[in-house]
Amino acid sequence: MMGGHESDRLHYTRTCEMCGAVMQNVAPNKRLCPECVKQNQHQRDQKKALATAPLHREAYARREGPRKVLAANDSIGAVCARAIAAGRTYGQQVEYERRQKELKDRGEIDKK
Ligand SMILES: [Zn+2]
């Protein structure tokens, strides 16, 4: 229990507003039992997490830095997606990107 020196003032018996559990030796303004407080907090956290999840993911991705993004760009899934977008097969897309990279490396086309 917190604040042992104030224990004289904590000897109240209250009933939990959510589940009706009897709580002894608690603060007079105590309304929920620890179990319901936990549940309440959990629900609030879930709601908050749900509301902010996309933002978190974006921030996380940004924090990851360019190296990880590059790896993602080179993943089979990413190449496949670009192949589909460009109307190529996966093999054609790999070949095309290799050629583009060669040209870029030689400075023949502008680097983005
Ligand atoms: Zn309760």
Image: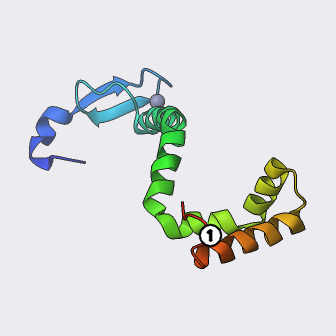
**Residue position for label 1:** 71
Q: Position of residue 95 (x, y in %)?
A: 82, 72
Query: Residue at position x 19%, y 34% from top?
Result: 10
Helix, strand or loop at mark 1: helix
Name of the residue lying farthest toward the front = 108
In the rendered view, would you say 83 is above or below 4?
below
Q: Where is residue 44 in the image (x, y as percent from the top left)?
A: 46, 32
Q: Which amino acid does label 1 sit on?
A: Ala
Rendered image coloring scheme:
rainbow
Query: Residue at position x 23%, y 31% from top?
Result: 27
Name of the residue lying farthest toward the top = 17
Query: Residue at position x 61%, y 66% from top?
Result: 109
Q: Mark 1: few, some, or many residues within 10 Å (few <14, many ≥20)?
A: few
Name of the residue lying farthest toward the left = 5
Q: Relative to the observer, which residue lies in front, 37 or 53? A: 53
Q: Position of residue 66 (x, y in %)?
A: 49, 65
Quadrant in which the C terminus appears = bottom right
Query: Residue at position x 55%, y 36% from top?
Result: 50
| Number of marks in the rendered image | 1
Q: Relative to the observer, which residue lies in front, 103 or 73? A: 103
Q: Where is residue 3 in the image (x, y as percent from the top left)?
A: 15, 46
Left or right of residue 44, residue 71 in this image = right
Q: Relative to the observer, which residue lies in front, 78 or 49? A: 78
Mark 1 vs ligand 1: CB below 8 Å? no
Q: Relative to the observer, which residue lies in front, 74 or 16? A: 74
